[in-house]
Amino acid sequence: MVSKGKNVPRLRQIADINRATAKKARESWHMLTIMAEFIESTERLAELRPAVSIFGSARIKPEDPYYQKTVDIARRLSDAGLAVISGGGPGIMEAANKGAFEGASSSVGLNIELPHEQASNMWQDISISFRHFFARKVAFVKYADAYVVMPGGFGTLDEFTEVLTLIQTGKSRRIPVILVGTTFWKGLLDWFRERLVADGMINAADMDLVQLIDEPANVVDAIFAFYEARNELLSEDSKEPGAYL
């Protein structure tokens, strides 16, 4: 790379010693808190296999049909021997944790500190708190053998498209990515085909990374069918966690 002779300041070049010391200490402490979150999640989740991450809106209420469907899905997954990882908060996250908590396998809440919306629910066998979204997102992907995505807003779309990107680019292994709710998701998938595929932004085969399913029992069946088709056992000893490198 050819330098254009620009004066790019470095931390070591700060002339004010007190300011330099304070800035270094602040940045070092910030990095340590990030490392601590990665270390804690690794220590507590590394042996949690197999597992499914469930996403969806924090704003959905217990009386909503999607809340009830999420409880059903999570309970079925838990009784089938799969731990359930969710965001630890209200709405779909609470429903996922509740269903798993009432089942045979672990209910995991990856909680995030937010100024609003996020308050930890009571249905968590394993509860981990995060300050940094990216450290939390690594845990969602790294320890998941499948993604189940319920209706949600920007955060749900962020998680959904990120895991598709990681699989598409080979940064994470191929796992089932299941959207639940045809009425909610069909328009987005149609747009993917009509714009992203048609304009060459993604390959037509990339659409095969996603399944659209409505019935809770079919969600569980689809996850097991995915691994059976690859002659892989969906068990705690079958494989290492996803790379996410």
Image: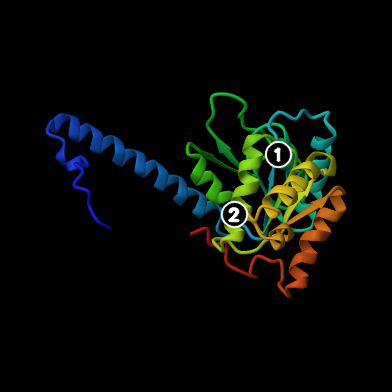
Question: Quarter-wise, where is residue 99 in the image?
Answer: top right
Q: Amino acid at mark 2?
A: Thr
Tag in front: 2 or 1: 2
| Rendered view: 37 above or below 236 | above
- Give the residue displayed 61% in from the left and 52% down from the top: 163
> How many other residues sit within 10 Å of disc 1, few (<14), some (14-19) or many (≥20)?
many
Q: Quick one: 101 or 152, which is closer to the camera?
A: 152
Residue 74 appears in view: no
x, y percentage for residue 75?
A: 79, 47
User: Is residue 120 placed above or below 227 in the rendered structure?
Assistant: above
Disc assigned to residue 56:
1
Mark 2 lies on a secondary structure that is helix
Left or right of 108, for residue 131: left
* Residue furthest bottom as drawn: 231
- What amino acid is found at the position of numbered circle 1 in the picture? Gly
Tag 2–tag 1 contact (CB < 8 Å):
no
Q: Which residue lies under the disc numbered 2?
A: 165
Q: First in sequence: mark 2 or mark 1?
A: 1
Residue at x 19% of width, y 41% of height: 7
Is residue 204 in sight in this rendering? yes
State the SS at label 1. loop
Q: Which of the labelled discs sits on residue 210, or is there none?
A: none
Residue at 74% x, 49% y: name it: 194
Q: Is residue 58 above or below residue 191?
A: above
Question: Looking at this rendering, what residue extends furthest in the top direction?
Answer: 116
| Image x and y of residue 159, in percent | 62, 45
Is the residue 65 above or below the residue 243 in the image? above
Q: Residue at x 48, y 59 (%)?
A: 245
Out of 175 and 44, give the one closest to the viewer.
175
